[in-house]
Image (cartoon, coloured by chain):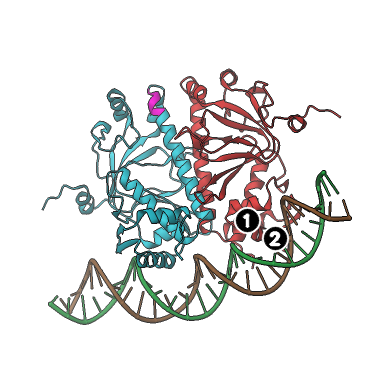
Chain colours: A cyan, B red, C brown, D green
Amino acid sequence: MENTTPQSIALHSSAPVNLSEIRAHCSSCSLHQLCLPMGLAETDMDKLDKIIGRRRRVARDSALYRMDDPFTNLYAIRFGHFKTYQINSGGQQHITGFQMAGELLGMDAISTERHHCDAIALEDSEVCEIPFSGLEGLFGEIPNLLSHFHRIMSREITREQNVMLLLGSMRADQRFAAFLVNLSSRYATRGYSSTRFQLRMSREEIGNYLGLTIESVSRLLSKFKKLDLLKVDHREIELLQLPRLKALAAGTESCG
Amino acid sequence: MENTTPQSIALHSSAPVNLSEIRAHCSSCSLHQLCLPMGLAETDMDKLDKIIGRRRRVARDSALYRMDDPFTNLYAIRFGHFKTYQINSGGQQHITGFQMAGELLGMDAISTERHHCDAIALEDSEVCEIPFSGLEGLFGEIPNLLSHFHRIMSREITREQNVMLLLGSMRADQRFAAFLVNLSSRYATRGYSSTRFQLRMSREEIGNYLGLTIESVSRLLSKFKKLDLLKVDHREIELLQLPRLKALAAGTESCG
DNA sequence: CGTTAGGTTGAAAGGTCTCAAAGCTGGTGG
DNA sequence: CCACCAGCTTTGAGACCTTTCAACCTAACG
């Protein structure tokens, strides 16, 4: 049996993180049309490569960073999934997002130079460390990089506004449908199936994110199954009627 | 009676916006330690002045921009208050934020070059138009401006995460307490009283923002009044026990 | 002084949560 | 190979919180 896949390396090592000191190369990365270097010329991508730190493995359930950690790097996800959550003063956590390959983590830390949330790997994952000071140094040289960085931050703002919309004005079934539709489209842009995928998070994590209890999520899954909107087997999901799910999320259609 | 105050100009003119063509000057603006030019040297502030467009009046209830409007400017609020809201596919609106003097509007439009929400003045207000292309041109020249801009965008991300926390995991009374405490601290940083201020938004708008009905907001006000946490007279509010309100928002204390 | 918009209050309904129990699955050890 | 356990999930019943629906109030305004 081969022992060289990322997962196996992480699993067989004693240390859960920082396993890989391999330098990252944007130009050879399959995600570069989705990630920070999007649209960059080859020469500019090389410059970006020079400032990018090592690739870093993060084993399942371990932290990429924790709240209040000093901010030095942004992280681009190479593969795997993460969740980010805040802990309120009552001690309970609330998940603010699930992130997947090609997405950038840590932007909320720029303002105070400390991370505002915990970022935990949902499965064995790998990220590129992007030292922010190095990135700032490149902005003057590569205007395209700067403007794309602004677009990424702006997109994060609109993403969060959509979640506010979801939490502030949708019923439980709408929220859950919107959640599934959102995952679906993100997998689609990554070249995966928009109708069959694996949930990387537990029911509890889904509920926490959507402002629902685990029982409500479970009931909604059962209800959607009964309505033939989807099939579930553990975390394996197949969306049978994506259009109806979209209509449900939009509030156009109701599931009495 | 004088007819030269910002309000009266706006009120007596036929056109609701674009009344003022006076060029803005950051250095003479009382908000420059709160706003985009924060921490800038005098000479850099002058450069910023050169690219900043006119000041623009926005009469109460009229739009600074609308969803899908093409994005050309960011806006810094000089005085007055705004609300921003999204409209979901069902046609109902959801308020994503209330903005006040010194805060920046429009950052969510950078990613798609179209505005993602409506921005409506809650009272007669004035903003500085900041052409984004001009701002981008300055970033290379003034690194401090760029890094402060990044801090502002990052702060917007954390602000929204806090709202997600509020909507996703707080009870109605906690939400309302958190809302009041938030306003209180923002007025405090602007040099106003942290305990006495005027609500610029209707009960309906508060409820919409907090994911509650107008009736719930009204009941919470009555409840808080009964508990001697505050006094209300229409939109005039006095917080009588800010510490207890903070404890309520934090979930440390409960109001049975 | 009637009208209107915004706000308050009450009673009933509804949705989601809480609590509880049971089912399923994968891992462990005999 | 099977029994057993722990963790996650599902399902049910009742409670609770917030909403809905309705009536009433108040201030502003023509």
Q: Quadrant of residue A54?
A: top left
Asked if the residues shown at circle 1 and circle 2 are in contact, with their CB atoms under 8 angstroms apart, the answer is yes
Secondary structure mostly seen in magenta is helix
- Characterize the local packing of mark 2: few (<14), some (14-19) or many (20 or more) Cα atoms within 10 angstroms: many
Taking depth in this image into account, of A234 and B13 the one nearest to the observer is B13
Residue B57's label in the rendered image is none
Magenta stretch, residue numbers: A142-146
The residue lying toward the viewer, choosing from A184 and A96, is A184
**Image position of A187 with respect to B147: above or below:** below
Q: Is residue B108 magenta?
A: no
Local SS, label 2 = helix
- Amino acid at the residue labelled 2: Phe
Image disc number at residue B176: 1
Q: Is residue B184 visible?
A: yes
Residue B49 locus on image (x, y percent): 60, 20
Give the amino acid type for the residue marked by disc 1 in the picture.
Answer: Phe
**For residue A149, side relative to residue B68 (left or right):** left
Q: CA distance from mark 1 to mark 2?
A: 10 Å
Mark 1: few/some/many CA within 10 Å (<14, 14-19, 20+): many
- Asked whether residue A88 appears in the rendered view, the answer is no
What residue appears at the point 47 percent right and 42 percent down from the top-left corner? Answer: A158
- Residue that badge 2 annotates: B224
Question: Is disc 1 in the same subunit as disc 2?
Answer: yes
Q: Position of residue B17 (x, y in %)?
A: 67, 30
Marked residue chain, label 1: B
Closer to the camera, B65 or A90?
B65
Q: Is residue B69 left or right of residue B245?
A: left
Q: Secondary structure at mark 1?
A: helix
Rendered residue at 51%/26% (across/down) = B132
